[in-house]
Amino acid sequence: MGVVKKQGIANSIWIYAGLILGYVNVGWIMAKILSTENFGLRSVLFQAGSFFSVVALVGMANVINRFFPSMREQKGHHGGIVAFIFSYWVVGILISAIVLHFTQTWVLAFYTEKSALIEEFYYFIIPFGASLALFEGLAAYCRALLKTTFPIFIRELAIRVYNLILLGLLYFNFIEFPEFLYLYLSGYILGAVALIIYLIKIGEFKIEWSHAFAWVPRLKEMIRFGFYTWFNNSMRMIVKTADVLMLGAMDLRYAGIYGLGSLIGNIVQVPSQSLRQIAAPLISRHFDDNNIKEIGVLYSKTCMVQLIAGLFLYLGIVLNLESLFTIWRSEFADAKIVIILLGGARLVAGSTGMNGRIIVESRYFRMNFVFNLIMGVMVIGTNAWLIPKYQIFGAALASAITITTISAMKVLFVYSKFGLQPFNGKTLVALGVGAVAFLIPYFIPHSGMMVLDVAIKSLLFAALYIFMMMQLRLSQEINGMVLNGIKKVKVLLRMEG
């Protein structure tokens, strides 16, 4: 437990530091110094490469997580796992690259003359996606070795520092935009190389081709499991990328504006992402003990924590939208509706988020496949219907409808099978508290000074929200976290004194 705790603390530091730096890089610096079209091109290519990597991986990361323990320490080379990773990766990349090549005409025809820049960078999707896929495969190997900190440091922080340097070079005209984009998309190549060097250093990079066949007896089982997880991952990636990719087909500027809005709107899901990882093993343990009551308690508590934390972030962002958008060019104004709709949908998904983990850990885990299939079909269908009519607003509405509908379906499914649902009277009280804390500072007149407006409104909102939530004792966990934070501040002040 000491190793896990130590790595967990380090991982959290790198994740949150990288998160802040990522928003600074993309949401502030990049959105200011790139043209809207070039900003959209970056968004489209990044999403396309990310989707390519998921398709090419064919569930490799999940296969390693599931099957590595049975091969670990086998003759010092873990059953030739490194050779297996590279073999699996090469086959996936070759198949995906061939498909990308033969669909080039259709894809480029889909992207109209307004998005002609896509053609120039089309084939760079392959090395970018391939490097990202290799990085994820090697990162999964590191996780299986219980060496999680370095891969997270590289992905969450080091690559973003590299991107910040590139933005500086672009801003001071040392490089032009095409060079910037090639170097930017090459970041994961350097990341994969860094992981290889790290594995060599710790003595775990042993390519034993003759032993890679040790996996063959379980190959059928691995492929079946790999395709199952690959499909689920692909559907989730479609939900994440379809809106930007389909908007880019109309106009790269739309993709850029939408990309900025989704970047900010998705901040709301950060608390739920962290909490799901913590709660997953507890839910699994309670299912092993057939303790549905404890799952219900955990379900209710975690969803309340996610609602309170997510609502705080969502309302804080919406409260300051007008002031924050003075940072960007006026053409980014349409991103406001993206933030409101997508952030609201992420709030709904987060505050009901444990339903997904309950389904996955239960005997109904195959329903996760069904929900992901419905989600993929819905997001493509609603985007295809709404984007031609309403462009940026249509894409945001399509994603919001999909996310909210799937969340509701999962809540109903969990209730029908286990009699569990996360809502109670405190849910309405929390929403009421959020409304009151939001409306009071909302009507404060603007001073004309962006920093002052944001500071006054945010501090008043935070004070009202936290005070009312704590006085009403809506969540013991939230109250405990706030009180613990206050104690730490007091200790620091005494030390300073």
Image (tube, rainbow, N blue to C red):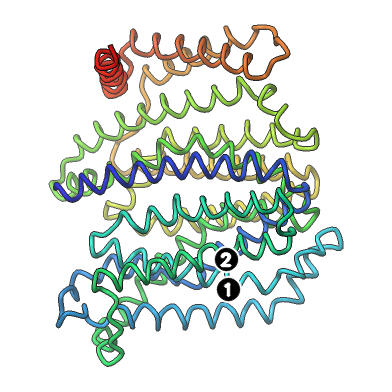
Q: Which residue is mark 2?
A: 186
Q: Residue at x 40, y 80 (%)?
A: 86
Quadrant containing the C terminus is top left
| Picture quadrant where residue 115 is located | bottom right
Taking the view exactly as shown, the residue that stands out farthest to the right is: 113
Q: Nearer the viewer, residue 285 or 338?
A: 338
Q: Which residue is mark 1?
A: 127
Q: Residue at x 60, y 63 (%)?
A: 185
Q: Is residue 426 above or below residue 95?
A: above
Q: Nearer the viewer, residue 175 or 323?
A: 175
Q: Position of residue 113 (x, y in %)?
A: 86, 63
Q: What's the residue type where badge 2 is placed?
A: Ser
Q: Residue at x 54, y 82 (%)?
A: 95
Q: What's the residue type where badge 1 is placed?
A: Pro
Mark 2 lies on a secondary structure that is loop
- Who comes first in sequence, dot 1 or dot 2? 1
Q: Is residue 124 left or right of residue 152?
A: right
Q: Nearer the viewer, residue 337 or 43?
A: 43
| Picture quadrant where residue 468 is located | top left
Mark 1 lies on a secondary structure that is helix
Q: Are marks 1 and 2 in contact (CB under 8 Å)?
A: yes
Q: Position of residue 241 (x, y in %)?
A: 60, 55
Q: Is residue 13 left or right of residue 122?
A: left
Q: Position of residue 1 (x, y in %)?
A: 14, 48
Q: Position of residue 405 (x, y in %)?
A: 53, 41
Q: Few, some or many C-alpha atoms within 10 Å of disc 1 (few <14, some 14-19, many ≥20)?
A: some
Taking the view exactly as shown, the residue that stands out farthest to the bottom is: 210
Q: Residue at x 69, y 15 (%)?
A: 449
Q: Is residue 325 above or below residue 439?
A: below
Q: Kindly report which numbered mark, 1 or 2, lies closer to the viewer in this rendering.
A: 2
